[in-house]
Image (cartoon, grey):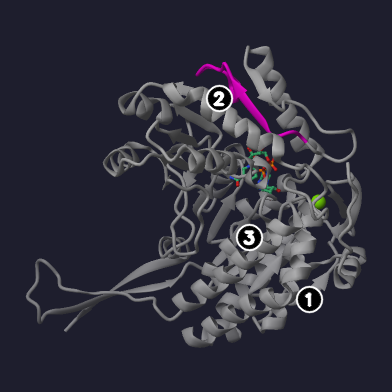
């Protein structure tokens, strides 16, 4: 395997080597326990940095800071316009430090540097700008009562910030997930305690510095890195947190929900998926084949919306499987800093073992790997892009989220056959449809139980497009104006005249 040839930005070298603390009330502080934890470079398996390890005591301090910032201080007194300008500034600073952030993301997560530069970082900057615009557009309604004469009462609604928000994010798009969570909450005037994933804390910590540089007041954004079972669980259970927003596994989503029951804090969940990607025989096959490959191999399959169940109309099955397999074989699996890298390592040894475990279970249950099916080399956490055939509906590889570059290709007979097959999953996050028949495309889109349906495209993300899941893929929506519901309460004011 080629070694990394892009040299590290000096700012990145300094940041990686620094001692990392947590951000509480505008100060970078050690963990109350004095403990630290390592984050690794998944291309080598070596320790990249050591980070202050947040736990209950730190979560308590951070929530107290967020509460104080919500109740008093400059934040609640600020006009929406001022707040919006600060949120916009975060976007500008992300752009200013784009190369540094892209390098940190590639080092800590493993993704190709060119992908972090082209997708993660600009999408994160745009997210802050999109929600900066919403700060000044929050409105209530005036409402006529149904049972009283119009001159007896004046009633209206106010949309107010939900309060202190806990945000727990995953490792697949570390900076972008922080942006998805922070930007709308800030725009609505909430205060926040953010817990990045233990595998990838670096870009969130750098974002903490950027948030300070932008001039967001102390205590409004607190960042407590640490493990899920300790820091994350303490946040989800905390009695003084008004709302918890989580992205990650469905299993942990259920734990968050239970923990939140103590004070009935509001909960939004963006969880796993097993998304169907459907290729009809009237599709533009070149586009459909490269689109199907991108749907599963983008970000090494570590996407909640990955098109991991590829359904192909039976008369074109062999042709599409062959095309997607050829795409897979051309993918250059290298360290993220290699300029020829198309796919980096998976994020961690644990994730690599999980994905390899699924590939083995598929083989044991009778599936066949047309291409891939194994780890690459013995250093770093690389696996081969994999296409499985000869599967059936009962296999684990067809039912469970693999979260790696592994697709199961399955034939179907027509539009009436594919809808129940597509919906035969506990998940409902996303789906893809490839056809030239616009009537069929929209008819099938309407019947799919999924939060996003892409037609003749896949993985198209925009801050303006709501995203989230049906069924066990979650509660609530991220992005668009829909996410604003997550971060606001509606107050009805009714006055007798
Ligand atoms: P995870 O769900 O454990 O981790 C996501 C976040 O939750 C991290 O910040 C973690 O520290 C935190 N967390 C873990 N346990 C917690 C708890 N008890 N209370 C509060 N917070 C907690 O995901 P993990 O273990 O890293 O990956 C396992 C599988 O989850 C993947 O193979 C994939 O299937 C799925 N996943 C889905 C993601 C998505 O975007 N929907 C992202 C990451 C993982
Ligand atoms: Mg790491």
Is residue 6 rendered to the left or right of residue 261? right
* Towards the viewer: 494 or 38: 38
Residue, disc 3: 119
User: Where is residue 321 drawn, in percent x and y?
Assistant: 56, 27
Label 2, secondary structure: give it: helix
Q: Is mark 2 within 8 Å of ligand 1?
A: no
* Towards the viewer: 323 or 131: 323
Q: Which callout, 3 or 1, points to the residue nearer the camera?
A: 3
Q: Which callout, 3 or 2, points to the residue nearer the camera?
A: 3
Q: Is residue 441 above or below residue 192?
A: above
Is residue 338 rendered to the left or right of residue 490? right
Q: Which callout, 1 or 2, points to the residue nearer the camera?
A: 2
Residue, disc 1: 27
Kindly check if marks 1 and 2 are in contact, taking CB atoms under 8 A apart as contact. Answer: no
Assess whether residue 430 is covered by the magenta stretch.
no
Q: What secondary structure do most residues of the magenta stretch adopt? A: loop
Q: Which residues are magenta?
A: 383-404
Residue, disc 2: 398
Kindly check if marks 3 and 1 are in contact, taking CB atoms under 8 A apart as contact. Answer: no
Measuring 53% from the left and 53% from the top, which residue is drawn there?
A: 263
Q: Residues within 10 Å of mark 3 (few under 14, many from 20)?
A: some
Mark 3 and mark 1: span between their CA atoms?
30 Å
């Amino acid at each position: 395997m080629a070694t990394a040839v892009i040299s590290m930005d000096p700012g990145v070298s300094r940041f990686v080597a620094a001692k990392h603390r947590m951000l509480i009330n505008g100060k970078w502080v050690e963990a109350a326990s004095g403990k630290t934890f390592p984050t690794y470079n998944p291309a080598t398996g070596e320790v990249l940095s050591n980070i202050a390890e947040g736990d209950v005591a730190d979560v308590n301090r951070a929530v107290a800071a967020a509460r104080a910032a919500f109740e008093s201080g400059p934040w609640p007194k600020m006009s929406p316009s001022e707040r919006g300008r600060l949120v916009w500034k975060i976007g500008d600073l992300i752009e200013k430090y784009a190369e540094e952030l892209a390098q940190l993301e590639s080092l800590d997560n493993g993704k190709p540097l060119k992908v972090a530069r082209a997708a993660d970082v600009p999408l994160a900057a745009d997210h802050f700008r999109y929600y900066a615009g919403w700060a000044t557009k929050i409105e209530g309604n005036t409402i006529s009562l149904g049972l009283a004469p119009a001159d007896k009462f004046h009633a209206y609604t106010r949309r107010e910030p939900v309060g202190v928000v806990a945000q727990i994010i995953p490792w697949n798009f570390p900076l972008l997930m922080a942006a998805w969570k922070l930007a709308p909450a800030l725009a609505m005037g909430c205060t926040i305690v953010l817990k990045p994933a233990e595998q990838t804390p670096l870009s969130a910590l750098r974002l903490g510095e950027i948030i300070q540089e932008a001039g967001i007041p102390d205590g409004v954004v607190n960042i407590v890195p640490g493990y899920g079972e300790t820091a994350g669980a303490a946040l989800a259970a905390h009695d003084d947190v008004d709302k918890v927003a989580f992205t990650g596994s469905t299993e942990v989503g259920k734990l968050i929900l239970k923990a939140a029951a103590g004070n009935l804090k509001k909960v939004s969940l963006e969880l796993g998926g097993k998304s169907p990607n459907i290729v009809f025989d009237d599709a533009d096959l070149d586009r459909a084949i490269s689109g199907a490959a991108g749907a599963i191999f983008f970000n090494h399959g570590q996407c909640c919306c990955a098109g991991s169940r590829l359904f192909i109309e039976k008369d074109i099955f062999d042709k599409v499987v062959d095309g997607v397999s050829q795409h897979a074989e051309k993918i250059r699996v290298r360290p993220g800093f290699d300029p020829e890298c198309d796919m980096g390592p998976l994020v961690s040894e644990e994730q690599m073992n999980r994905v390899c475990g699924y590939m083995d279970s598929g083989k044991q249950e009778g599936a066949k790997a047309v291409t891939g099916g194994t780890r690459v080399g013995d250093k770093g956490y690389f696996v081969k892009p994999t296409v499985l055939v000869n599967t059936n509906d009962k296999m684990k590889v067809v039912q469970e989220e693999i979260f790696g570059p592994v697709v199961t290709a399955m034939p179907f007979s027509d539009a009436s056959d594919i809808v129940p097959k597509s919906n035969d999953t506990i998940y409902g996050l996303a789906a893809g449809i490839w056809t030239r028949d616009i009537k069929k495309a929209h008819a099938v889109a309407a019947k799919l139980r999924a939060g996003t349906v892409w037609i003749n495209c896949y993985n198209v993300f925009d801050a303006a497009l709501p995203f989230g899941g049906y069924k066990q893929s979650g509660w609530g929506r991220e992005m668009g104006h829909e996410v604003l519901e997550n971060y606001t309460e509606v107050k009805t004011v009714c006055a007798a005249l």
